[in-house]
Image (tube, rainbow, N blue to C red):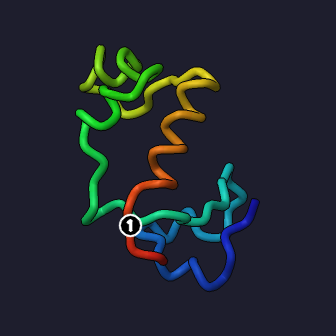
Amino acid sequence: MREPENEEKYWIDSSDKGEEKLRVKMKVLKNLVNIPIYKNEIRNTNGLESISIFRQSQGTNFPLTNDEWRLLKNIIFNHNTKPL
């Protein structure tokens, strides 16, 4: 996928500009930056007590089962945040 023209100005290394790269389009649905979901809220949710992030907290990406994702997504979208 090629970079949309209006986003090319954000490239730091201009030698990559215009090249086809693997990309993912995404849209932010919830802003949790100033209203975090605390670890205790997740840990106290039945089905999320032992998700991988609690066992290996030094990583970046953490696998979840479909059920764990459904529970976590429920917490995220029911969390009291400001609309975007």
Describe residue 73's horizontal placement relative to residue 55 as left or right: right
Describe residue 80's horizontal placement relative to residue 2 as left or right: left
Residues 38 and 53: in front is 38
The structure residue drawn at horizontal position 54% and vertical position 43%, both measured from the top left corner, is 73
- Which residue is denoted by mark 1 in the rendering? 81
Kind of residue indicated by mark 1: Thr
Q: Quadrant of the N terminus?
A: bottom right
Measuring from the top left, give residue 55's x and y in whole percent: 29, 14
The number of numbered discs placed on residues in the rendered structure image is 1
> As displayed, is residue 30 above or below residue 61?
below
The quadrant holding residue 81 is bottom left
Q: Which residue lies furthest to the right in this view?
A: 1
> As displayed, is residue 77 above or below residue 65?
below
The structure residue drawn at horizontal position 41% and vertical position 69%, both measured from the top left corner, is 12
Measuring from the top left, give residue 21's x and y in whole percent: 67, 53
Residues 64 and 7: in front is 64
The structure residue drawn at horizontal position 53% and vertical position 26%, both measured from the top left corner, is 68
Q: Mark 1: few, some, or many residues within 10 Å (few <14, many ≥20)?
A: some
Measuring from the top left, give residue 15's x and y in whole percent: 53, 65
Residues 81 and 5: in front is 81
> As displayed, is residue 54 above or below residue 31?
above
Look at the numbered disc 1 and give the secondary structure of its residue. Answer: loop
> As displayed, is residue 5 above or below residue 35?
below
Residues 15 and 8: in front is 8
Measuring from the top left, give residue 17's x and y in whole percent: 59, 69
The structure residue drawn at horizontal position 36% and vertical position 19%, both measured from the top left corner, is 49
The quadrant holding residue 4 is bottom right
Describe residue 66's horizontal placement relative to residue 46 as left or right: right
